[in-house]
Amino acid sequence: MVFTHTKEPQETVIQEDKGAQVVATKQELESENSSLKVALKRESGFEQDATLDASLDTESKEDNNQRSVIQAIATMALELRKQELSIIDAKIIRIQSSTNQRNDVTTTLTFKNGLSLEGVSTEINNPNVRVGIVNPNDTVQIIRPTVKQEADGKVKSLVFTGQLGDQLLIASTAHLKEEQSIALDSYGELVIDGAVELNQKDRPPYSKPITVNILKPKLSSMESSLDSKDFEIVKTIDNLYTWDDQFYLLDFISKQYEVLKTDYQSTKDSVPQIRDILFGEYAVEPLVTAKDHSNTINIYIRSIKPLGLKPMGATPVANQPRPFRSLTPRSARMRRSAPIEEPKSELEHHKRIDYLGDNQSTQQDNPDTTVDNADSQHDTSDLYRLYLDMTGKKQPLDILLIVDKSGSMREGIGSIEKYKYWESRYDQYYQTWISVGAVYFDEYFGPTYQPDRFTSYTYRSKESVSSGTRRDQAVKDALLGSTGLLQKFLDINPQNQLAVVGFQGSVAHRYYDEKLERTPWNTIMYQPSIETSKDADILKNWENSATLDSESLSYLSNNGTNYHAGLLKADEMLQKVANNGHRKIMLFISDGVPTFYFGTDKYRSGNGTTSDENNIINSQVGSKLAIDEFKRKYPNLSLYSLGVSKDINSDTASSSPVVLNYLSGKDHYYGISDTQQLEDTLNKIVEDSKISQLEISDSLSRYVDYYEQQPDLLVTRTSKSTKEVQTLFKDKQITNEGKDIVDKVLFTPKADMQPKGKVTLTFKPDYKVDDEYTYTLSFNVKASDKAYEAYKDMQGTYSVNGDNDTDYSGNQTSSGKGGLPSNSDASVNYMADGREQKLPYKHPVIQVKTVPITFTKVDADNSQKKLAGVEFELRKEDKKTVWETGTTDSNGRLEFKYLQKGKTYYLYEIKARIGYTLPENPWEVAIANNGDIKVKHPIEGELKSKDGSYMIKNHKIYQLPSSGGRGSQIFIIVGSLTATIALLFYRHQHRKKQY
């Protein structure tokens, strides 16, 4: 049962300097239930009809306020991070109050049964409890309260002074650690963000749960498989949680295991999402219902011991495949074994800003909009124009081809269904049937077929056999000649470079330092070392030429397949062109699964055949380790792989493309079964190397609004050579010049699910840009209400500076200047090498121009008497939200600095000078769009400014005259007269009753 009451005023006699006595009052609001008592006090009191209702909240069920509470805690956690603190546990108190007096409120919280807070400190001199006051504008004020604890450690009471919010967050805190390690038993340890907590009991309400699963390959599956169904969970950590909107995974450390892949599923995701890298930021979501799954990271690992490989030209560091290394190494344990080349961007791109409010001083109007023209009716003091441009560049490519030359490349690239029969012939000399072997027919002749009396065929099965052009010849035809792949790459840019490597796995050669190895068939195989192996060779060194001897691509008889040798030679070739600034593409072509690899002893392993299943499995694992090391060393290399036969495009162990898939990624593996398909695929790779599917997008920050009154959204194309400007989009439509270039130009307004507006320019999907033109998207924006609020909250300062080269020509408002960011995320997005690319723009800033106003508080009867110490609140148009507060100085003056044009405010006097009345009605302060100020009062009317200040008069409270003065005689006379009249009336009534 909750009850609320307002305490009655208590009379207090206060002596003023003139000896007069006045009456003042104090009030207290209280709310009390079975578990909580809340008392509010304020020196100037509350309204007579003010009410208060407060309750301790729990996460017992979903409600409409759940999301706001969770966001408020996340905001508090972010503010505490600035104080190097993290939240351990938190409780929420909801407050409903009808009072408008919300500043300088002293709040006392008394917990009748004690408040349990996990991790609360019992040290008197080191309290770790903080209170977060959630304000109506969603900001959180952090306060350190006075804490009283019970003997059992529970919080008995809290006292603090601050604003009166709609919610109170009570949190126990700890020093924020940079990082912390989570033990994974024998699998290693995980290093995570220091703000992630480990709950020993139950997860605190409203916190966001995190689960980490460690998965290993099942014993029954191939270690080379990356399919999630081939893994099983071996370790689960499900007692992690955070209060933030995200957490960071920093490192995985293990001497025995490496990470293969990672996927992540937040509580709102229906299925796990594959991540390109393990390390980095993970966005977390709260549980909506108790049945929801946690925010779950699945980390797939594999032992590094079975078939570790020789490092490729560098000393190994941590046992991690390339795709899961941190993009920005943060400690010595994450150093790379070789410098990583960052390719230069293929697009020049700039974001610049023009302040439209400076035309009066510069007399130069912006040529792309009319809002800043001299005859314009727009107030331009907070208007800006944003420019996002993009220019193509002819960046050379280095294209490396790795081509299989194994014996099976002599087979046909295609396949055909045939009927397999076993042939037998009758030997007339020995008078017996002799087995000859398998024969394939195009048609079925029955179970047995005997075309003559000396030949017999017995049906075995229907099989798919190779047919068509020989595989090596198909590769030659596709790569060479005036229409081949090599020439097409040179046609894109004559500065492109080409190189070709061939690989196989020789079983015929003897080597002087060979290692003898017995095969499953009890024969001896001579295995070379890495240094003496001839399993890969350079067929064409780096050149700006497409010439290549076609015979160098021919198959080699009796040879197996050694992917690892091809990758070692590829590494050698890439080292030759390292750091030349070219974008690099590698195309790996093979017709079969790997049957050789190099082991930890630096010698080759494997027997070159696909009939031995153990050899297939071991070669897949060994090749996969080689791929991991190669991709770690070349993270920016665009990889394609082609399987050029039926023998590499099925689900059997001996023909599965799992290793080629792993090399290039599933989206960039192509299974080829005929020459036309090979030609089409190579043409696609050439086209993919060009930039396409371009999009320029700008997600506006909360500090700017799209100026919908007149955005003047414009897209142009400017020739670099002639400087001619073509308009591609204007007046909300694509022009004739832009119809083959621009697909659409959109502004997506702010919405509940998308808090920021977004401007997007999308080009035609197949439109290719070059270095001849610069494409520019521009539009008008206006400083938002949030910008003024942020400027006010920062007391007229800015916390960030604009990036270099972000000013429009002739403008000096952004580069290196303090301001507020104009965009939250702006980028050029495109496809290159079949992969999504994103180039972020720099961040221009804006400033706001506020309007100051000054008031002078004076005595109503004597304007020369200035009243100091009078407290005011300047509230927004809703008459509730406080914009600024202030107190008059010794000259009775008070200044508010951060008013916004086009807004109306209300000035409330909240604490009067002793001896003066507290006005009931506020003053209306209206700021016109041009900055003119109008102040008026419902009783006093419009106020006029004098010497730059508006004078506000205060009336004294009526004072009782001093003892012995004439005023007392008047009261005596009036009192006696009243008593006489009452007596006469009584006597008259008494006489009437007698009669």
Image: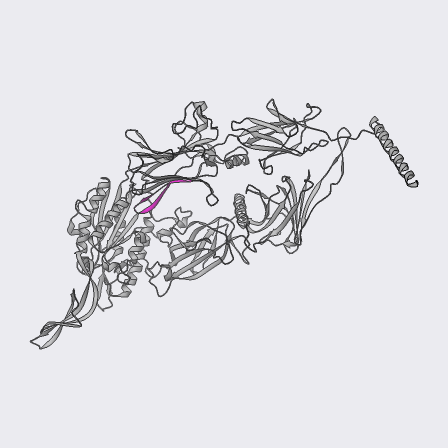
- 445 left or right of 3 in image: left
Q: Is residue 600 left or right of residue 545?
A: right
Q: Which residues are magenta?
A: 825-839
Q: Residue at x 89, y 34 (%)?
A: 984
Q: Residue furthest bottom?
A: 431
Left or right, residue 448 beside residue 286: left
Residue 460 on the magenta span: no
Residue 367 position in % (x across, y down): 38, 27
**Quarter where residue 513 is shown:** bottom left
**Outermost residue, left side:** 429
Q: Main secondary structure of the magenta part?
A: strand
- Residue furthest to the right: 994
Left or right, 885 with respect to 190, comes to right
x, y (%) of residue 943? 62, 25
User: Residue 688, position in %: x, y?
Assistant: 28, 45
Relative to the observer, which residue lies in front, 61 or 388?
61
Q: Looking at this view, is 519 or 852 the one in front?
A: 852
Color style of the picture: one colour
Visible in this render: residue 3? yes
